[in-house]
Image: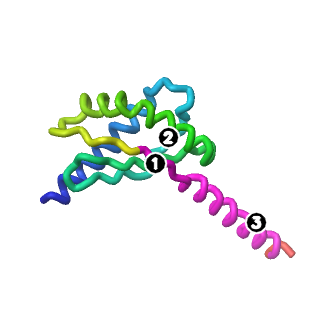
Amino acid sequence: MAGYKINRATSDIKIALSEILRGVKDPRVSKLLSIVKVDLSSDLSYAAVYISAIEGYETTVQSVKALKNASGYVRHELGSRLKLRKVPELRFIADDSIEQSANISRIIDSFDGDRKNEEKE
């Protein structure tokens, strides 16, 4: 039963954070942020939020720095949107998974294009 509660809280936090991040007015926070993963501790007191930006890793790092400064506001908003006994302390972590997946997609597309050229010959 405890695993179900953590999974439900994790998904609720992820959804609420995605809405909250759209409303952050700091210009350093990218508008194209994606929450990759949320890891919630077993006692629901800490949440590691992995964030990635489409613009690249440097933009992600700048956004994470800004979000660390605005973590009090984000935590307050999270507490007002969710019905949790204790709102978890948020740790924002930069993740480059979107950039890596775009790179892998480019590599696959280049192999696919090479194969089509070989078939024409």
Q: Residue at x 69, y 64 (%)?
A: 107
Which of the two marks, 1 or 3, is nearer to us in this view?
1
User: Residue 40: where, in percent of width, then height?
Assistant: 29, 52
Image quadrant where residue 17 sits: top left
Q: Quadrant of residue 53?
A: top right
Asked whether disc 1 touches disc 2, contact meaning CB atoms under 8 Å apart, the reply is yes
The residue identified by callout 2 is 64
- Label 3 sits on a secondary structure element that is helix
Most frequent secondary structure within the magenta stretch: helix
Nearer-N-terminus badge (2/3) = 2
Name the mark on residue 32.
Answer: none
User: Which residue of the protein is positioned furthest toward the top in this rendering?
Assistant: 25
Gap in angstroms between the C-alphas marked 2 and 3 = 37 Å
Callout 2 amino acid: Val
Give the residue displayed 29% in from the left and 49% down from the top: 10
| Residue closer to the observer: 115 or 34 | 34
Q: Amino acid at mark 1?
A: Ile
Residue 31 drawn at (x, y percent): 53, 33
Please report whichever mark, 1 or 2, sits nearer to the chain's N-terminal start. Answer: 2
Assess whether residue 112 is covered by the magenta stretch.
yes
- Residue identifier under label 1: 93
Type of amino acid under label 3: Gly
Q: Which residues are magenta?
A: 92-118
Whether residue 57 sits left or right of residue 10 in the image: it is: right
